[in-house]
Image (cartoon, grey):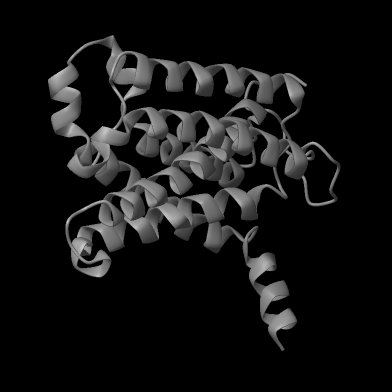
Amino acid sequence: MWKWYWETFKAWLDHRWFLWVLFTVNLLGTLYGFYWYKNQLIHIGSWLNLFVPDSPTASAAFTLVLLMYIIGRRSPLLEAFAAVTLFKYGIWAVAMIVAGAWTKDLPFLQALRWTDWMLAASHLGMAWQAVLYSRFFTFGTRELSLVAAWTLLNDGLDYGLGIHPWLPASLYPFLPAVAVFTVCLSLISLALFARLVLPPRPERKWSLPLLTGKE
């Protein structure tokens, strides 16, 4: 029975109505995510803002990937960027929420607010989407290498220049450990999607033309 439900759900992933549902959910989540970062973006107020809103940038990329599937196009580079960053920042946010609550001078469950639960659920959804849709992605080592360069540059700027997402106050004494965790998570995310996407699969959307029109 569970196998039937799982196979049915997997079949939905490529249905047009389901793509529209996910597109709408991710679009709304992306807009809320950029709004969530508004104070930090105003505070930094420079070209470095390009590297500040990590999670909404990741979900924006995936929203565009979904839109391209709806209109019958694909972009391997955008797929690679969406996959790695969705998973990385999805897991990262949940880890920071849990660690922030754990290090507060309160019982763990009391330290978690309703926004923490909401953010944890939405970010786990981000990571899950990346894994689920990896079966369709068409990127190769070139695109993954470009995303690796961007991701590690982002980490360097975040913790070298202090433009990382604002953390719970209880975590700032552990900032070096957070930086190491973030870089390790980048490497894990890159390795995971190399494993998930580089091998051939029959579901991959090779039949869709490239967004650029060049093969």
Is 210 on the left-hand or right-hand side of 20? right
Quadrant including the N terminus: bottom right
Q: Quadrant of residue 167?
A: top left
Q: Does residue 38 show up?
A: yes
Q: Is residue 65 above or below residue 143?
A: below
Is 203 on the left-hand or right-hand side of 70? right
Is 187 on the left-hand or right-hand side of 207? left
Number of marks in the image? 0
Percent coordinates x, y for residue 51 in the rendering: 36, 21
Q: Quadrant of residue 122?
A: bottom left
Residue in the image at 13% along x and 21% along y = 43
Q: Nearer the viewer, residue 18 or 5?
A: 5
Percent coordinates x, y for residue 81 in the rendering: 56, 30
Residue that sits furthest to the top in the current view: 47
Q: Nearer the viewer, residue 190 or 198?
A: 190
Percent coordinates x, y for residue 173 in the rendering: 26, 34
Quadrant including the C terminus: top right
Q: Does residue 213 show up?
A: no
Percent coordinates x, y for residue 185 in the rendering: 54, 37
Q: Is residue 106 above or below residue 186?
A: below
Is 153 on the left-hand or right-hand side of 27? right
Q: Quadrant of residue 128?
A: bottom right
Residue in the image at 68% along x and 66% along y = 10
Q: Nearer the viewer, residue 74 or 178?
A: 178
Q: Nearer the viewer, residue 85 or 108?
A: 108
Residue in the image at 41% along x and 28% along y = 179
Residue that sits furthest to the bottom in the current view: 1
Residue in the image at 46% along x and 57% along y = 125
